[in-house]
Amino acid sequence: MKEVILAHIEKKELDVLKELLRNSEEMAIIQAFYELPDDELVIAFRLLSKAAALSIFEELDTDLQKKLLKSFTEDRVKLFINEIAPDDRVKLLDELPATVAKQLLESLTPQERETTNLLMGYEAGTAGRIMTPEFITLNRDMTIEQALAKIGVQAEHKETIYTLFVTDSSKKLEGVLTLKGLLIAQGTKAASIGKTDGSSRIGDIMSKNAISVSTDTDQEEVARILHELDLLAVPVVDREGRIVGIVTIDDAVDIVHEETTEDIEIMAALTPSDKPYLETHPLRLAKNRIIWLMVMFFAAMLTGGILDKFEYAIAAIPLLVIFIPMLCDTGGNSGSQSATLIIRGLAIGEVTPKDFFKIIWKEIRVGLLVGTGLAVLNYLRMMIFYGNHDIYGDNIIMISVTVCLTLLFTVVTANIVGGVLPIIAKKCKIDPAVMAAPLITTIVDALSLIVYFSIAMWLLGDLMV
Amino acid sequence: MKEVILAHIEKKELDVLKELLRNSEEMAIIQAFYELPDDELVIAFRLLSKAAALSIFEELDTDLQKKLLKSFTEDRVKLFINEIAPDDRVKLLDELPATVAKQLLESLTPQERETTNLLMGYEAGTAGRIMTPEFITLNRDMTIEQALAKIGVQAEHKETIYTLFVTDSSKKLEGVLTLKGLLIAQGTKAASIGKTDGSSRIGDIMSKNAISVSTDTDQEEVARILHELDLLAVPVVDREGRIVGIVTIDDAVDIVHEETTEDIEIMAALTPSDKPYLETHPLRLAKNRIIWLMVMFFAAMLTGGILDKFEYAIAAIPLLVIFIPMLCDTGGNSGSQSATLIIRGLAIGEVTPKDFFKIIWKEIRVGLLVGTGLAVLNYLRMMIFYGNHDIYGDNIIMISVTVCLTLLFTVVTANIVGGVLPIIAKKCKIDPAVMAAPLITTIVDALSLIVYFSIAMWLLGDLMV
């Protein structure tokens, strides 16, 4: 057995090995485990099914258990596991049994924990990746005094003692209780001494509908739950409902910072980076920026193509060119205003895809108001600056009307596009933040140029013959 | 006295009344207070100096004290105070004495509290505006048992019992203590019974260097302190160091959400609004958007003016126009990428104004990398699309070089402008978020158009005669 395992690991045939282990006798595996070198031991262990992993782990003697847990931090093993594609990794590595996960987490420093999560099978950005094992569990049959005594003894070594988790003998989460609730219950009991038998149990005072998340819950969702339910800590459970760790409210602040930074970066057409700006190499920064710039460079060819088609109009009335940057900028800015409000609204839950038509209707009204305001301003400005432009004479009024109508159209369109695209993205499970300023600018530029020259041909066709 | 006070309030001569009250005998004021109608009573009270307010409040009988506190919620009074300009309000209304503030806060519902803060003199976005009075204070001479007993009794009615505040008889903050620390101390004591006299005092175990903020500390700063020092609650004190309220960590999450929403909105050239999108009237939304659009509309006149100056170049080589949107878009997008990284870096403290030259040097390198990449891409594209354009013949190479050089210049300039402007804003105490995409787009547009036509005249001057 030992040789077969070693051979498969050597050849990186992990799926074959996984299949083999699933069909082997437990005793044979345990036998092989005692003979395997540390690195191969942990790899083989991670390929076991969750149930087998648990029962085999419990069969091993304490020394081998410790050796196994220690191997999770071995650089060679991490490199090996890192080479597997992330989606294969999810398929290959079953969930770690709660008891093993907790023991492992407790034996590691926070830094080691961060790097070991890879091997534990928790993907980045999930509850499993940020949870801590330092919490206090109580038993439903404990009295208030016993609970307080346990808290007093363990307090020093736990991250929080303010939320207490009640579990059964198999570590399944049965309820939660705050320390505040516990102290209030103690106070109530003290006040009613003599009337009751004075022995209320944790099971009677705990809240039975404990809110929990699972190891693969998205960290953004975890932060939302902590914040909205005003919790100091939320328990993280495995598939069978066993508690593996907790995430605390101060982590939520970190998550909110991290997630909004990511959103803001995506909105500015940047590939998000998790390293601080000053520590990022220029080559890396350039890579993060150029990808989207290239996408938008090609998109801008569209705008160029439109101008190309109307070259004759430009040659006939060069004055038209002067207003192109103003029209494009105003369109881009209006669209980005709408998109920003909707993207942010979606992120903090103020807006949902159900509000689709409400948003369109609102954006049309806002667009008409803003567009009319800017159009009037533009008309006045054009009359003052070009009103007695000798080349264009009376045609300047028609040219002004062309610019003003396009401006109104551009603002309304930009508002609708900016309001609608993030919602569509959300519906299609794309990050709405992608639909921000840069992309919308390109779309709105193209639309407004087409409209600009179409109106120009309609109103000023005579000048272009 | 009563008539004089009424007359001044009637005529809205609050500064005269304030001066008068400062120079009056305390007994005369108290006498007048008993005769004043409720609304005028609270206005006169708020005009007293802090010291006078405290001593007069303590002289009043409980009924009048209650009447006074109740008047803080009167709509007429709020309207009256609201009419004063905010900076005058700060000058006129002295800080409220801690005892009065706490009693007032406790007598109000959270909703009432929100609207009363105006009258209390706490400006929006400060610790005073978001603090709660529901905290537990201990005394340094209490024993651990006495402290635990007090917590047990008060727990139910306090927002948090996990951070405890130790004050002297005048409510001055002397130290803080966590419930965890208290329980650990109790455990230690229990373990060492017989060895010590068993009567350790709160004063011995509290932390004497209590971190606190004042009522006018910016809420963003409060959130930063809570987060960075990993606190569950931070005390808010008045000028004399008396504790008035606390701000808890779950408020920090709200603040972070609120402040980043504000930043994101300013970055998109929106006037920030504190009402959810769907509940904001289109007229209000239009107003929030049009102000910046108008500013940028006028800024875009600059770009128009530049194009106006080069009209003859456009008439001679209409092909040049085709690349204007691409150049402007790429410049705007690059600038917005840099600005976003720096604005966000400043907001979360990863970047400081001291990094000014580091940022410039980094942005130049990134700009050269990205600009060169895009320029090469653009050269290939122009050769493919216009390489055998019959009108331009061999000149197409020179035209391509013009566009590519401008593109490189634009990206580098945009990066520098985007990286530097937020830092300069921060230095000038302007919100760096103002220096985002829209403003930078306008600046970079103007610069790159000037460079575009300058290079064109240099390389293609022959075609323009």
Image (cartoon, coloured by chain):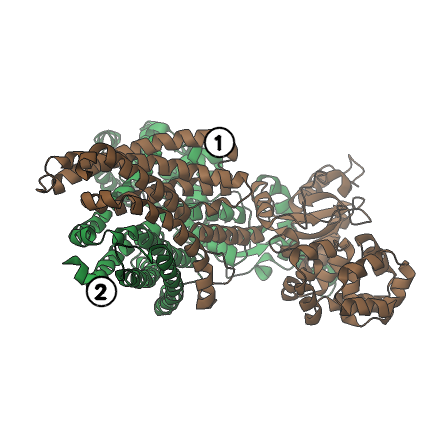
Chain colours: A brown, B green
Query: Whole-percent x and y of residue B255?
Result: 46, 47
Left or right: residue A122 compared with residue B302: right
Q: Quadrant of the N terminus of chain B?
A: top left
Q: Which residue is mark 2?
A: B459
Q: For residue B19, which numbered disc appears in the image? A: none
User: Residue A85, image x and y in percent?
Assistant: 66, 59
Please give the chain letter of the residue carrying mark 2. Answer: B
Kind of residue sitting beneath label 2: Leu
- Residue A369: horizontal and vertical position, in percent? 30, 31
B264 or A1: which is nearer to us? A1
Q: Residues within 10 Å of mark 2 (few under 14, many from 20)?
A: some
Q: Secondary structure at mark 1?
A: helix
Question: Quadrant location of the C terminus of chain B?
Answer: bottom left
Question: From what the image shows, is residue A85 above or below residue B22?
Answer: below
The answer to whether residue A409 is visible is yes
Viewer-closest of B142 and A183: A183
**Cα–Cα span, label 2 and label 1:** 54 Å
SS class, disc 2: helix
Residue indicated by mark 1: A355
Q: Residue B334, image x and y in percent?
A: 37, 57
**Which of label 2 and label 1 is nearer to you?**
2
Q: Is residue B185 left or right of residue B411?
A: right
Residue at image position (38%, 61%) is B380
Up-down relation of residue A371 to residue B437 (above or below): above
| Disc 1 residue crowd, few under 14, some 14–19, many 20+, Cα 10 Å | few
Q: Which amino acid type is marked by label 1?
A: Asp
